[in-house]
Image (cartoon, rainbow, N blue to C red):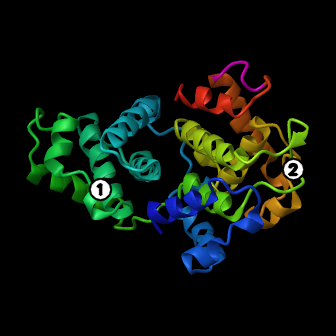
Amino acid sequence: FSSHFYLSMTLLTVGTLFPYQTPIDEELNMETEDLFRDMVERQVDYVSPGDYNPTASYLPYRRYLVDWMSDVGEQCRLHTSTVHVSILYLDKIFRSNDIPRSQWQLLATGCISVAAKYEEAEEHCPPIPDLLQLTRLSQAGHTSLSFREGELEVLRHLGWRLRAIPPIHIIGYFLAKGTTFEDDTWQNRSLIEKIPKYVKKYADFFCNLTLQEYSFQEYLPSVLAAAILMASRVALQLQPRWRPELVRLTGYEEADITDVFTHVWSYYEEQFPGHGHRSISPRGVTSDMSHL
């Protein structure tokens, strides 16, 4: 599983109004539900309530690391999901190891490089000399050889198990299978053709938003992904906010994700005061996302 699968599934969703119009299994020539079950099984390798460590020493600085890594990923033109995987790598290393601050930038860049090699096509992986220059590690005296050692340290910390499942991967599956329905309503009207595209925009927005805050790692990625899907429907004023079809798709009843949804929505309102109470149109999605 890689971001290419995530992208192929979500791209098939764009412009599709109802799930029965998305023959995703036929398009990819695979049984996608098997992949989803595998993601759910493997998600605990990187994020699980048992690994949650709210007292980790790096957490006061984590937001800066996340923003910095996201900026590096953007400049390297990496897929958003690759950056999310790299941050899961960083969290797994930093929450259980006392990493000297002098090594933070090297290991964070190493996480980006390793994630790119695992998630991206080879031609999209940033060359090490370019990474050293972009991150100014070369000015700190690092060479391609010493950076390779940094990558190896990342791999050793991760036990060479590189398949991380962030919520954005699971959201890709949900969106591709279909998350809007013929009898949904949007602001008490029938749905328009662009609604699935804006559900995806809001889902990506909430994935990026929750990535910034470590407390969301208290939840399994599949639970958080389902809550993000609900938040995306609520943000667009789709009714009902949850449906039996979504229970079958995600595996979660509305009661199972209500507390997590509340956490997501409260954090959204905290970061964007007033947005959670106003009437939201699809045009507002771009406005919200521009603040991230």
Q: Where residue 235 is drawn, which disc sits there? A: none
The amino acid sitting under disc 2 is: Asp
Q: Which of 35 and 144 is in front in this view?
A: 35
Which segment did they paint magenta?
272-276
Image coordinates of residue 155 in percent, x first then y, are 30, 61
Q: Which residue is drawn at 24% across and 43% down?
A: 106
Residue drawn at (79%, 39%) of the image: 234
Q: Name the residue under label 1.
A: 124
Whether the magenta-drawn stretch holds residue 274 is answered as yes
Judging depth in this view, the residue of 129 and 200 nearest the camera is 200
Amino acid at circle 1: His
Q: How crowded is mark 2: few (under 14 residues within 10 Å), some or many (20 or more)?
A: some
Q: Which of 157 and 86 is in front in this view?
A: 86
Residue corresponding to mark 2: 184
**Quarter-of-image position of residue 285:** top right
User: Measured along the vertical axis of the image, is residue 278 above or below residue 246?
Assistant: above
Residue at far top of view: 274
Dot 1 falls on a residue whose secondary structure is helix
Report the magenta stretch's main SS: loop
